[in-house]
Image (tube, coloured by chain):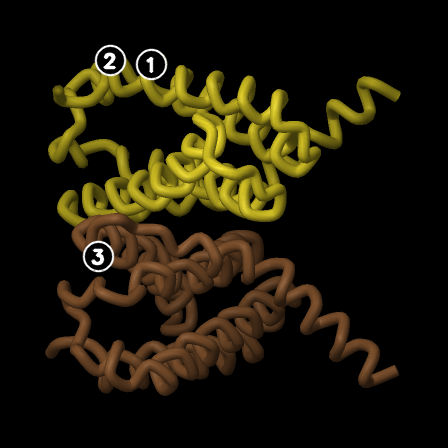
Chain colours: A brown, B yellow
Amino acid sequence: MKISLKLKAVALFATVTLPILSQAQFAKSEDAIKYRKAALTVMSTHFGRIGAVVKGAPYNKDAVASDANIVAMLSTLPWQGFGPGHEGGNALPEVWSNADKFKSNADKLQETTAALKVAANSGDLEAIKKAFGATGQACKGCHDDFRKK
Amino acid sequence: MKISLKLKAVALFATVTLPILSQAQFAKSEDAIKYRKAALTVMSTHFGRIGAVVKGAPYNKDAVASDANIVAMLSTLPWQGFGPGHEGGNALPEVWSNADKFKSNADKLQETTAALKVAANSGDLEAIKKAFGATGQACKGCHDDFRKK
């Protein structure tokens, strides 16, 4: 049963993300850079709104769930903008020279935003705070190693 | 039955969009402008990928459905960046002086992207082409009247 669920999760992941990954089709680096920055900007705006609630702003369950839903979807997107040959922008060369670690960080972010979405939809503010913290750590980990200061 | 379904659709619309609309909270115009440009950039990238298929690139149902899903979600977002006092960027003053028409255009875009998503998930390429055309018209209508040339 446990294995079956895991297989289902893997199949779902493949269905959801592979079409996106297989479409990493930017002819120009400037378009790839613009796209990844844009996806990260939208994501961080909505993540920041959850952050305001975590720091004490009034909690509205529907608003936080909506923000978390947007964050979770957006977190799947920026990576296609970091394809081969699209160095530049705020990205350090290590994105390409240490691609396995970068991918591991990208996966970690998507895992933590998926958990944040679940927490936000549950309406449990303590769970949201915990999941927000884990997501923030995933952001920071990647920025520390792969983003220009 | 028909009325009941319609009411359900209205309730769903309210649930999905009202929390977003009520969160139009940008302290600085530069952040609002950056946000709306970013949302439109991500949306237009994925819309452009569907456009390539409409113009003859190989059709992959899952990829187009994924792109249409992203377009539909992103089409709900930019408007919160056009709040009172956030003039500037590529937006003409008419966004604020003719706000009813702008809102009508924004609603039209969201209707057409929702229909595009339905068509994309159906896998009917002719329906996708038609819905793509209607969405493109909605983009153009708004750009003609509300965006700097």
Label 3 vs label 2, nearer the camera: 3
Residue picked out by circle 3: A33
Using the rendered image of the protein, determine whether residue B62 is visible from the camera's viewpoint: yes
Q: Point out residue A138 in the picture as x, y percentages from the top left corner.
A: 39, 81
Q: Is A125 situated left or right of B1 in this image?
A: left
Mark 1 neighbour density, 10 Å: few (under 14) some (14–19) many (20 or more): some
Return the chain for callout 2. B
Cα separation, mark 3 vs mark 1, equals 28 Å
Return the chain for callout 3. A
The tally of labels here is: 3
**Is residue A101 or residue B88 the one in the foreground?**
A101
Q: Secondary structure at mark 2?
A: helix
Mark 2 neighbour density, 10 Å: few (under 14) some (14–19) many (20 or more): some
- Whether callout 1 and callout 2 share a subunit is answered yes
Above or below residue A140? Residue B16 is above
Q: Point out residue A77 in the picture as x, y percentages from the top left corner.
A: 41, 59
Above or below residue B124? Residue A39 is below
User: Is the Cβ of the residue at disc 3 closer than 8 Å to that at disc 1?
Assistant: no
Task: Give, as a three-letter code, the residue at label 3.
Answer: Ile
Return the chain for callout 1. B
Residue shown at 71%/72% (left/top)?
Answer: A9
Residue shown at 26%/20% (left/top)?
Answer: B143
Residue picked out by circle 1: B141
Residue picked out by circle 2: B145
Q: Is A87 situated left or right of A110 in this image?
A: left
Q: Quadrant of residue B129?
A: top right
Above or below residue B22? Residue A29 is below
User: Is the Cβ of the residue at disc 1 closer than 8 Å to that at disc 2?
Assistant: yes
Cα separation, mark 3 vs mark 2, equals 29 Å
Q: Point out residue B59 in the picture as x, y percentages from the top left corner.
A: 56, 38
Task: Give, as a three-letter code, the residue at label 2.
Answer: Asp
Residue shown at 55%/69% (left/top)?
Answer: A114
